[in-house]
Image: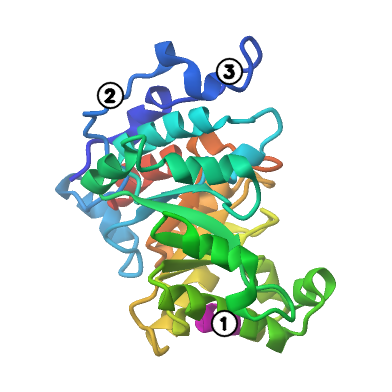
Amino acid sequence: AAATPCATATATTRATRGGSGPRAFARDRSRRAIAPSSSLVLRVTRRSATAAAAAANGDAAPRRVDIYDTTLRDGSQQVGISLTCDDKLEVASHLVSLGVSHIEGGYPGSNPKDVEFFNRWDSSGLAKAAEARGTKLCAFGMTRRKGVEAKDDEGLNALVRCVAPCACIVAKAWDEQCERVLGVSGEENLAMITDSVSYLVERGKEVLVDCEHFYDGHAANGEFAMRCAVAAAEAGATHVVLCDTNGGTLPWVVEEKTRAVVDALKKSSNPSCRVGVHTHNDTALAVANSLAGVRGGASMVQGCVNGYGERTGNADVLVVAANLELKMGVT
């Protein structure tokens, strides 16, 4: 059982607003109360004290939810935050001490700083610490490019070479985005998902798929969005993560559509594939939508410490974890 995580809002690393600037996000030791021996864990289990709250959530909500932290990648896209490799390793050490299930270290195919981070993971001592805490390192990437075979795609091969045992690849789940942004048909997009996941799984990677624009895509063409999620699962993904990329979906819609995907994957050829949610805060609903996703059966929440992230930010994983345990009876 986890220690109550509500105190982590003051115990975690955070950026200062002015003063020494964004690098204080990782450097300001005077503001840190988390020791490496901390027993705070952000994966929650049902407690007797919250049994009534858990019962009120119905049978769809899982008993345990994994926290996938993307502060080092998505959180770093916030204006005013620029982390050095040393900063990223320091932040990662505190995420390990918190016991998050996954740490997304960066995008090895995009910039030298992220490549350096992954190259220093073992020598920094974080690999052993993460293994002891049950935390997995994850690298971010994309599906193969249009017209390129998976084996020839440099982005996928960067994930294969990366020390991270897990790869999280983003895939379009909105047919309009496929045509307008990628310049591919819906069928080609489905093939890109299948080829990319299969290629990584065959090379020993645990693969998560972020279905970008899933909820908006489902509103426009529900059948296609669902086919994208099922294609990822049936190609071997361990998690299909439903993204509210524009941050405008309402909580009851998130719950309903998440439940539909959970039910669909149970009927797929990979019924053990789990569902996650990844929300943005453009309408101040990122935390609410994360909790709604859990009510719909999601067993993973992706987000960032203190709600950092692109535009108005991602779901604050600390607030999500506290609400899950204290109000929903989920760890």
x and y percentages locating residue 178 in the rendered image: 76, 75
Question: Which quarter of the picture shows residue 144?
Answer: bottom right
- The three-letter code of the residue at mark 3 reads Thr
Q: Nearer the viewer, residue 206 or 62?
A: 206
Label 2 sits on a secondary structure element that is loop
Q: Residue at x 53, y 83 (%)?
A: 231
Relative placement, left or right, of 214 versus 272 is right
Q: Residues within 10 Å of mark 3 (few under 14, many from 20)?
A: some
Q: Name the residue that disc number 2 marks.
A: 35
Q: Is residue 128 left or right of residue 10?
A: left
Q: x%, y% of residue 8?
A: 37, 29
Q: CA distance from mark 3 to mark 1?
A: 43 Å
* Range of magenta residues: 227-232
Q: Looking at the image, is 313 positioned above or below residue 254?
A: above
Camera sees residue 278: yes
Residue linked to disc 1: 195
The amino acid type, in three-letter code, at marker 1 is: Asp
User: How far is disc 2 from disc 3 in space, using C-alphas?
Assistant: 20 Å
Of callouts 3 and 1, the N-terminal one: 3
Give the label on residue 16, or none. 3
**Cα separation between marks 1 and 2:** 43 Å
**Could you tell me which residue is drawn at 33 percent across and 51 percent down?**
328
Q: Residue 242: horizontal and vertical position, in percent?
A: 55, 66
Q: Classify mark 1: residues with Cα within 10 Å, few (<14), some (14-19) or many (20+).
A: some
